[in-house]
Image: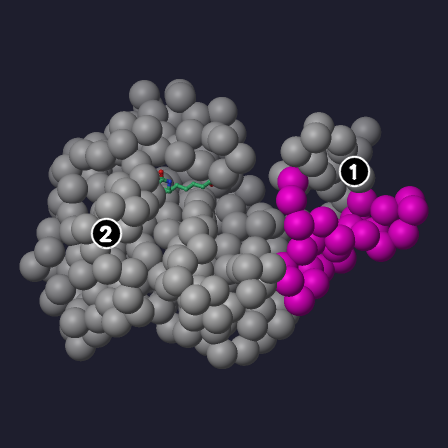
Amino acid sequence: MQNNITLLNLESLTKYLYPESKQFILQILDSTDSTNSFLINLLKNKQISDSTDFIYVVAAELQTKGRGRNGHSWRSGFGESLTFSLSWRFKKYPASQLSSLSLIIGIAIIRVLRHFSIEGVSLKWPNDVLVNRSKIAGVLIELRSGIRNSYQTVIGIGINFNLSENTRNCIDCNVTDLFEVTGKLLDRNLILSALLVEIKKTISHFEMFGFSYFKNEWISYHAFEGKHVCLNMPNNQIVQGIVDGVNDNGAICLLTDSGRKMFDVGEISLRDIN
Ligand code: BTN
């Protein structure tokens, strides 16, 4: 781990976001429990409006209780990652379609990392971002129903930049970070601004065209396409099968002994074939 990090700062972010900076309201915190929880509380307490005119973004150098999917925690030390959340209100969009939102956020992250010449990035259903099978980024989306059938979402993203040994020891899966992958300390302000612009563009297309517009691109990024996997369901049932794409709602399709089946929950892992 290298120590000379550039801290997140509004001046650089605003400069990099130009000319789109006016569409974002940005807040940078030294420390908070979780940027998702922080933003959800602002919305609940009406400290920010849930209008569609602006996108609120909260980024933190340190999360003391960072949250991951399925009750996992998300760990990182001060400045070691890019951890941020943004709000997006969907107007008249069926909640059933929103399960695929997390997949298109994965696409936005991959596009940005590739733009910065980061090689070997792929996705693991539904939205883990991997480099050479080690996790580099994750997405946690939380949903609240709002006024007139609209849905307010809080989209939280964590990307590992430069994890300390101490942090790595607390994480119970294979992880990597951008320093390990590139040998460089990338400017988190630059990457955050590129992500915000790409996420805004990607969600706007998703609202117009739905997930089917992205389906083939998503499959092309999937590290486990055509692989024999185990799917661990929330009820601890394990399903085995060969990955055969995703459907128009972002559910994963598995070729199992009892036919082709779709699943919209669970965690996949490669099956050990002895
Ligand atoms: C996962 O892979 O399990 C999802 C990880 C999501 C982590 C991000 S960091 C910013 C935001 N705030 C949180 O508490 N979690 C998300």
Label 1: which residue? 239
Assess disc 1: are there few (<14), some (14-19) or many (≥20) residues with their C-alpha within 10 Å of its C-alpha.
some
Where, quadrant-wise, is the N terminus in this rendering? top left
Question: Is 226 part of what is drawn in magenta?
Answer: no
Asked if ligand 1 lies within 8 A of label 1, the reply is no
Give the main secondary structure, helix, strand or loop, of the magenta stretch: strand
Where, quadrant-wise, is the C terminus in this rendering? top right
Query: Which residue is at a point 49% across and 25% down the rendered structure image?
Result: 172
Question: Is 247 part of what is drawn in magenta?
Answer: yes
Percent position (x, y) of residue 183?
Answer: 31, 45
Magenta stretch: give its range.
241-266
User: Of the residues tagged 1 and 2, which is closer to the observer?
Assistant: 2
Residue 110 falls in which quadrant of the image?
A: bottom left
Q: Are marks 1 and 2 in contact (CB under 8 Å)?
A: no
Assess disc 2: are there few (<14), some (14-19) or many (≥20) residues with their C-alpha within 10 Å of its C-alpha.
few
Residue 12 falls in which quadrant of the image?
A: bottom left
Query: Which residue is at a point 22% across and 70% down the rendered structure image?
Result: 23
Mark 2 secondary-structure assignment: loop
Residue 68 falls in which quadrant of the image?
A: top left
Label 2: which residue? 46
Identity, as a three-letter code, of the amino acid under mark 1: Val
Query: Which residue is at a point 35% across and 33% down the rendered structure image?
Result: 66
**Nearer to me, 47 or 190:** 47
Percent position (x, y) of residue 270?
Answer: 69, 38
Specify which label sits upstream in the sequence, 1 or 2: 2
Asked if ligand 1 lies within 8 A of label 2, the reply is no
**Nearer to me, 32 or 74:** 32
Q: Where 24 sits versus 102, above or below?
A: below
